Image (spheres, helix red, strand yellow):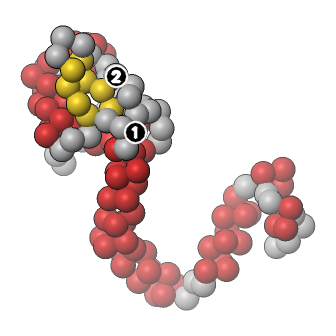
Amino acid sequence: MGEEWNDSQPIYRQLRDRVIAMILEAVLQEGDPLPSVRTVAADYRVNPLTVLKAYQQLADEQIVEKRRGVGMFVKAGVRGQLLRDERQRFLKEEWPRVLATLQRLGLKAQDLLDGAAAERSPADRPPSAKGQR
């Protein structure tokens, strides 16, 4: 989790979003415990009630499960659901803006692929992309 907070939304919401990002990036695996409320509060210098509120929201959304006396754990199968939700959100909210920008700039799919290939080093490129430009 990063240490910087922005003023656009409450810190508990940013903590919640960071946990979700860690699950999506497979930093936190299904079945892994979340760091303790006290640890997160101390590490990021936030009120433990703020961390607790973020964790409670994750539990309410059934992303994590509470195990009495043990802690909170990432639920099984949640990463796949989060990926589906994020893909749907991207397609509904972000893709229309991206598509409009691509059309406005006259960019085609091949332009994007060529740009992505140019960003990677030659050793990272798939065999069919080596030597092409």
Q: Is residue 93 left or right of residue 37?
A: right
Mark 2 crowd level (few <14, some 14–19, many ≥20, 10 Å Cα): some
For residue 52, above or below residue 25? above
Query: Which kind of residue does numbered mark 2 sit on?
Result: Pro
| Residue 94 in sight in this render | no
| Residue 126 in sight in this render | yes
Whichever of labels 2 and 1 marks the residue nearer the N terminus, that label is 1
Q: Residue at x 30, y 70 (%)?
A: 93
Q: Residue at x 40, y 50 (%)?
A: 80
Find residue 120 and report its horizontal and vertical position in percent.
Answer: 73, 55
Find residue 73 and report its horizontal and vertical position in percent.
Answer: 30, 26
> Which of these two is toward me, 101 or 15?
15
Q: Is residue 60 left or right of residue 121?
A: left
Give the number of the disc on residue 33.
2
Mark 1 crowd level (few <14, some 14–19, many ≥20, 10 Å Cα): many
Find residue 97 and report its horizontal and vertical position in percent.
Answer: 36, 76
For residue 49, above or below residue 114? above
Residue, disc 1: 23
> Which of these two is toward me, 133 or 88?
88
> Which of these two is toward me, 75 or 11?
75
